[in-house]
Amino acid sequence: MKKLCLTLIALFVVCQAAFAAAPDPTKPPVKIGLLAALTGGGAIWGEHHQKAAVIAIQEINESGGIDGRRAELVVYDTKGRAEDAVNGLRRLAEVDKVIGVAGTNMSGLQLAMLAVSERAKVPIMALSATNPAVTVDPKTGKLHPYSFRICFTDPYVAESIADFAINDMKKKTAICFSDVGSDYSEGMTQFFEEQYKKLGGTIKGRFGYRENDVDFRAQVTNAKATGAEIAFLPGNYKELALIMKQCHEM
């Protein structure tokens, strides 16, 4: 019976797609923007983001489009840099006239675009911008009306990790490696430290670095000297891989 039900559901979906009216080619397309880091440190995220968006646009058009109009994706590369993200959003809003923007996958970039999105009244749906300030002004507590996310937030993740470290791993001393200047890394570090200490743990040091650094031996040496039982590393792929590699070597 279960297989029969699944088969019927699959047939229904196929039939719906087959009989959906095609978008009217005489009508102008509905443009949707995409801001992804296709080059730079976050390129692996950006490439996945773009591929998923292309599939989504294809499925929308195969299902009849948006109000009978073809959906069209307009893509700009943020290069993982705030200035490129802001310029890309300006172009999407002022030149391409998009109805909304998918992006970005970095908190710092999303925060940099808030003023432009609100001025242009173009909503941005962040992929993995986890900093709470992306959706709520930390000074006033008011919501940003055009900035959204589809993911969890820094406090949720950092506090969960602190809870796991204390209650499951039974590790009561920790150090943190933090990417100086990264809204994501510094926010995660702050929330982790606060929750870790609240649960009875001791933070024995915080060691800073910057994006594109490759030698972390000084930080690792100082971290090791603290005698901490665990290290908390919120950051991006390249730097974290090098930090962990050098920790193992030392």
Image: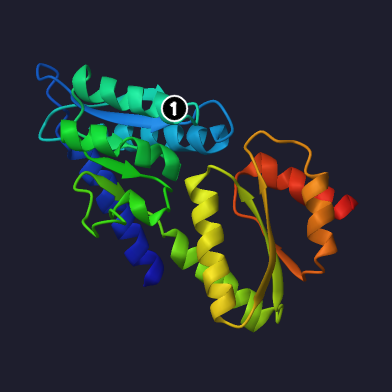
Question: What residue is disc 1 on?
Answer: 78
Secondary element under disc 1, as helix, strand or loop, is loop
Left or right: 227 as drawn, with respect to 107? right
Look at the image and tell me in which quarter the N terminus lies.
bottom left
Left or right: 194 as drawn, with respect to 207? left
Q: Is residue 218 visible?
A: yes
Q: Position of residue 234 (x, y in %)?
A: 60, 54
Q: Position of residue 139 (x, y in %)?
A: 29, 56
Residue under the image location 11 percent in, 31 percent down:
68
Residue under the image location 54 percent in, 25 percent down:
39
Residue 181 or 79: which is nearer the viewer? 181
User: Is residue 119 depicted above or below 239 in this figure?
Assistant: above
Residue 44 or 117: which is nearer the viewer? 117
User: Is residue 88 depicted above or below 149 in this figure?
Assistant: above
Residue 48 or 121: which is nearer the viewer? 121
Left or right: 250 as drawn, with respect to 94? right
Q: Position of residue 102 (x, y in %)?
A: 33, 37
Q: Amino acid at mark 1?
A: Thr
Residue under the image location 21 percent in, 27 percent down:
98
Q: Position of residue 11 (x, y in %)?
A: 30, 51
